[in-house]
Amino acid sequence: MKQILLLAAVIAAPSVAWAQEYKPDFNCSADHSKDSIATMLCQNSEAAKHELVFDQTYYALRQIVGKAGWKALRQEAIADDDALKACVAPDAMDGTLPKADPQCYISKMDEITQKYKARLSGSALEEANRPIDQHIALQQKFIDLGYLPAGSIADGVYGEGTREAISTWQRVSHRPSDDGFISDADAVVLSGANAPQQAQISSAPPVNYAPPQQPVASAPADPISGICHGQPQPMNLIIGFNDPYAAKGKCYEVLIASRFGRRQWIDENTVLIIDSLPSSSEAYETIVQDPNGHIQYGKIAIVIGVDPIKYTAASGEMIVAPTLEVIKYVN
């Protein structure tokens, strides 16, 4: 009988949990008719929950060992998978799929979890000891706050994207550490954090709004005229640039916002805005940074194009994003 490497699967497909109904860290819609443990996990919520608890500990340890230690940790997880074979009944004489015992699986999985948890300490251990439902709620908080992309699913498993979101939030919120682990103290602060107020497009000026009053920076003494060599041009920020270098050295007046509220904080001074045209599925990335302080999302600003920032998206694609630097905000 072919056994699925369930512990190794924690680095693959995400898990999903709904209220008190838990699903394992792989797709139950796939064909698992030849795998006793996979079939049991898709049918037994409590057993699936204990697998997710292991995932929490595994990913905490994965963060500690770093990329250099990921391969060795994965191999260790594959080796520990052998202990779960004891939970499967002998092959049936009639050829039907042998059943896996949920209680045996829970017991074995808890033993493996404790083995990995013994290598954690400090905020990593505090995080791993947290109930799965709290993990899901905290991860959803990062989505609500914009540190994870809108539309992400809070599954309680903290992969690379969530770790980066945690570290960014810790820096922006001036937490004592930006180690990427949610300590008990962090959890209290994060639970009470409010999402930045979204720019209400219905009541705020449209993104291509050009003030009817006198031109910005028309006064001779205004340094804007010297920096921009003329009047900044109104720009619809969400359209972005086909050429990310086209904005360099040019000044624009923009509303720093996304029509759909899709943004991700890079740090306190920098926000990545991802948007698309109403009739198009093509996404546009624009990075706006304020060198003088916290970026004021939802505000109209005079900006100047600078050298584009390169970053690697979650898909692994290298993105060259047009980058705008705030000169001043328009009252």
Image (tube, rainbow, N blue to C red):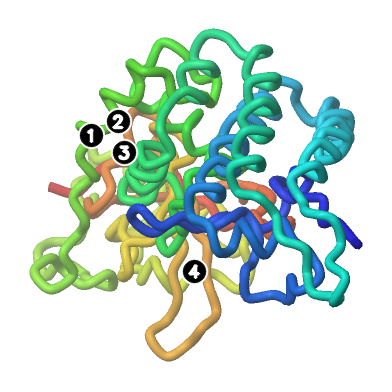
Quarter of the image that includes the N terminus: bottom right
Q: Amino acid at mark 4?
A: Gly
Q: Amino acid at mark 3?
A: Pro
Residue at 21% in and 56% down: 198
Q: Which residue is mark 1?
A: 193
Q: Which residue is mark 4?
A: 240
Of tags 1 and 4, which is closer to the observer? 1
In the rendered image, residue 195, in percent from the top left (x then y), is placed at 24, 44
Does label 1 or label 4 sit earlier along the sequence? 1
Does label 4 or label 3 sit earlier along the sequence? 3
Q: Amino acid at mark 2?
A: Leu
Q: CA distance from mark 4 to mark 3?
A: 26 Å
- Is residue 258 depicted above or below 198 in this figure? below
Q: Which residue is mark 2?
A: 190
Instruction: Tell me if 300 is positioned left or right of 55 in this view.
Output: left
Q: CA distance from mark 4 to mark 2?
A: 32 Å
Instruction: Tell me if 279 is positioned left or right of 110 in this view.
Output: left
Does label 1 or label 3 sit earlier along the sequence? 1
The answer to whether the residue labelled 1 contacts the one labelled 2, judged by CB atoms less than 8 Å apart, is yes
Neighbours of disc 1 within 10 Å: few (<14), some (14-19), many (20+): few
Neighbours of disc 4 within 10 Å: few (<14), some (14-19), many (20+): many
Residue at 39% in and 66% down: 237
Q: Which residue is mark 3?
A: 223
Of tags 4 and 2, which is closer to the observer? 2
The answer to whether the residue labelled 4 contacts the one labelled 2, judged by CB atoms less than 8 Å apart, is no
Q: CA distance from mark 1 to mark 4?
A: 31 Å
Of tags 1 and 3, which is closer to the observer? 1
Of tags 4 and 3, which is closer to the observer? 4
| Helix, strand or loop at mark 3 | helix
